[in-house]
Image (tube, rainbow, N blue to C red):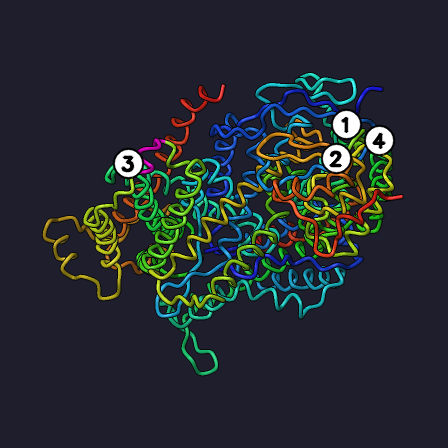
Amino acid sequence: MHGPDGFLNAATAVATGAISAGTIGASIRQARTTLTDKQIPLAGLAAAFIFAAQMFNFPVAAGTTGHLLGGTLAAILLGPSVGAIVVTIVVIVQAVAFADGGLTALGYNVLNMAIVTAFGGWAAYRLFRKIFPNSAAGVVAATGLAGGFSVVLSAAAFSVGWLFGANTPVPFDTVFGAMVGAHLLIGVGEGVISGMAVGAVLAARPDLVYGARDLDRSQLANRKALSTRTFLISGFGVVLLLAVIVSQFTADGLDGLERVAADTGITATTQESMPSIFADYATEGIGNESLSLAVAGASGAIITLLVGAGLFSAVRLQKPRDKAMV
Amino acid sequence: MTPALRVSDLSYSYPDGYAALSGVDLKIETGQRVALLGPNGAGKTTLALQLNGVKEPDSGTVTGGNLALAEATIGEIRRRVGLVFQDANDQLFMPTVGEDVAFGPANLDLKGDELHARVAEALLAVGATELEHRAPHHLSGGERRRVAIAGVLAMRPDMLVLDEPSSGLDPAGRRELISLLQGLPITQIVITHDLPLALELCDRTIIMDAGQLVAEGLTAEILQDSELLHQHRLELPFGFDPSVIHSKP
Amino acid sequence: MGTGHAHALFLHEHSKIHYLAPEAKLAAGFLFVVAAAITPREAVWAFLLYLAALIALIRIAKLRFSFLAARLTVIIPFILFAVFLPFVSSGERIEVLGIGISLEGAWAAWNVFAKASIGASVSIVLAATTELPDLIRGMERLRVPAVMTAIAGFMIRYLELIADELGRMRVAMTARGYDPRWIWQAKPIAASAGAMFIRSYERGERVYDAMLSRGYQGSMPDLGHKRASHSDWRTAITLPLLGIIISVVALRIS
């Protein structure tokens, strides 16, 4: 979602701008150690591919269509750092040349659509790889789940941004519920397309899939189909977890959950329970403040952890490759 | 007289082990135009990429003029041996024609007015002066091909290696290309499937197959040897009577 | 969100704005939008002045208002969101034309509308008066890392080509009766995307070979593009200066 100018307040725009600039700056510095001259035209062509891929629609259900965001796909094909840089360039050019997304909104647009999806998606991918066998099918499954999850993560990140910078009177829990809820379905589409696309590349040119570098020829050739059970259980688990979190924010949500919270003493309703660094608009009218705070905190923590893990993983993976390239 | 290009016992295998070139020996005299024919997969493009050092041979040498291809000489060799790629879109990678033609000479440290003059000179040579500010994507196939040649000519090379220059051109575009190449007093290697073009443009012809040179001689003679052609998946166009072929006047 | 992007907004005209150096335009446009974004929404007078400035800008750039209006559709989802706010928000209510709406919601809607429109309008004028490669060059002069602008340069060169190839793949699939409605029928689309990635990558390798062939030594050569002159900067600064003055006054007053 390309937010326009003035959508979030100035402080948020500046803060996210600094975070994005810092992260991308660090990615460039670190990618430069392996970003040989050859990588620049390659990354340029990859960027053109991502941009073009975003323009085309795929069917979701009953004739409705969706569009690819491609952050996790870019990370798995090109590596998280280059992937983040490439999608950032796409987002920036979309704002500057096509007026899609405000110039002053680039901070949070880049953060949500490029950094969170590339690094967060990469970290999720590494996690999902651990539960699947080391084979082409495992890579595809992990890509699919990570891709889907990254979309939801991006929506959650947007909501957290809303918590700090809301310029319109819509409370955080409504935004979170609506954004994350809507993106659950979009995420399925993104995940499926990303997974199958990576599968297609793996079949023809496995050397072009950064995320599959750890597989050797025999593992790649292993055509054994993935245990459907593992895939369904993990996919289901992810969706279930998210649905539980989201559902408590929907209108007439699960009163049961609130009752549980009250019974176990989690709920502590005071007028000023939400810290004042949050935007007033985002905190007014919230159904259950403590639970919202908990979810906001948890989302923020998860996003930060995953993006950080993705960044860390990107650095860690460079080192053994560095030696190989000498 | 020093030949414009000499290739000695060149061998090259792809990273996956496939032997693309095996012991290629080649000599091109200055001012000659030589056609390089052969079936798809013969290694013609691979050989072309060896001639200016873009790909490094496993063994053997490439000498441009009196300069052997080595790490120290690679810059000068790349200036001397101008490669025109099969797909002009791969070669026109700058946003406008003018910037693309300027890319080569700018890498030779030309600047300012001198650079601009060189660009103008190259565009004039191919008849594309009015295309200077156009974007490559909006050019026709023939225009793109001419601009690609200009980009190479701008480096004032000693020889041109053209990879399938007439492919994708309509008959008029093809005619313009042939006139252009005929008018350039520069050594040329023309990789092509277009046998009439080879006959019209090139005195000598080399046939390559499976990474090796298999035949060499006057174009007219080679094109009349229908069995040789057939052996290497080559065939004259319908209506071309081999017995009536004669060298151009 | 993503459709119809391959056709840039550039309109060829001979206006003062068209001839202005890209880095000056980008900096000026960005600063003006910042000024508008920090202006308190209650200072409606300030936004009327911004509107006047925009109208002047559009006239000087020799653009038609219908063109701008057509391109402004990009912010319609947010305008629609804004329109709902007065009706769904809580808080003090006022009567407008016999309908009760939330005051807070109305102000918030105005805020979104005003700032989004100004921002999008500036972006559109910028894009309409500056060719894409020049925009990239402008960003580089404004200290965007050279790695990114180099990648962006290749991206915009090959975007239309790749979009066209992808489009042709889709046409070929449709011609063989492919008419997917559900996500599980989307495998051919994903497969074509995968194939397109491989082709793009391989083209990237050939482009690199072509760069090497013409003497590329690791950094893009200086092709002698003119930098922004002092007069360029002097001309460009008028807009953001106006914006800054107005916004500071508005902030002071509020």
Residue at screen point 42% across, 42% down: A118
Query: Cα distance, mark 4 to mark 1?
Result: 9 Å
Which residue is disc 3 drawn over?
A134
Magenta stretch, main secondary structure, is helix
Provide the secondary structure element on which disc 3 rests. Answer: loop
The reply to whether the C-beta atoms of the residues labelled 3 and 4 are less than 8 Å apart is no
* Amino acid at circle 3: Asn
Which residue is disc 4 drawn over?
B31
Label of residue B189 in the image: 2
* Amino acid at circle 1: Ile
Residue at screen point 60% across, 62% down: C47
Magenta stretch containing residue A220, yes or no? yes
The label nearer to you, 3 versus 4, is 4
Locate residue A278, reporting x and y percent: 37, 48
Locate residue B65, reporting x and y percent: 78, 21
Which residue is disc 1 drawn over?
B28
Magenta stretch containing residue A63, yes or no? no
Locate residue A209, reporting x and y percent: 42, 38
Q: Residues within 10 Å of mark 2 (few under 14, many from 20)?
A: many
Judge if badges 1 and 3 mark residues of a common chain. no
Residue B121 position (above or below residue C251): above
Judge if badges 4 and 1 mark residues of a common chain. yes
Query: Cα distance, mark 2 to mark 4?
Result: 10 Å
Disc 2: host chain: B
Query: Cα distance, mark 2 to mark 3?
Result: 49 Å
The reply to whether the C-beta atoms of the residues labelled 4 and 1 are less than 8 Å apart is no
Disc 4: host chain: B
Locate residue A193, reporting x and y percent: 38, 53
Query: Cα distance, mark 3 to mark 4?
Result: 58 Å
**Along the polypeptide, which appears first: circle 2 or circle 4?**
4
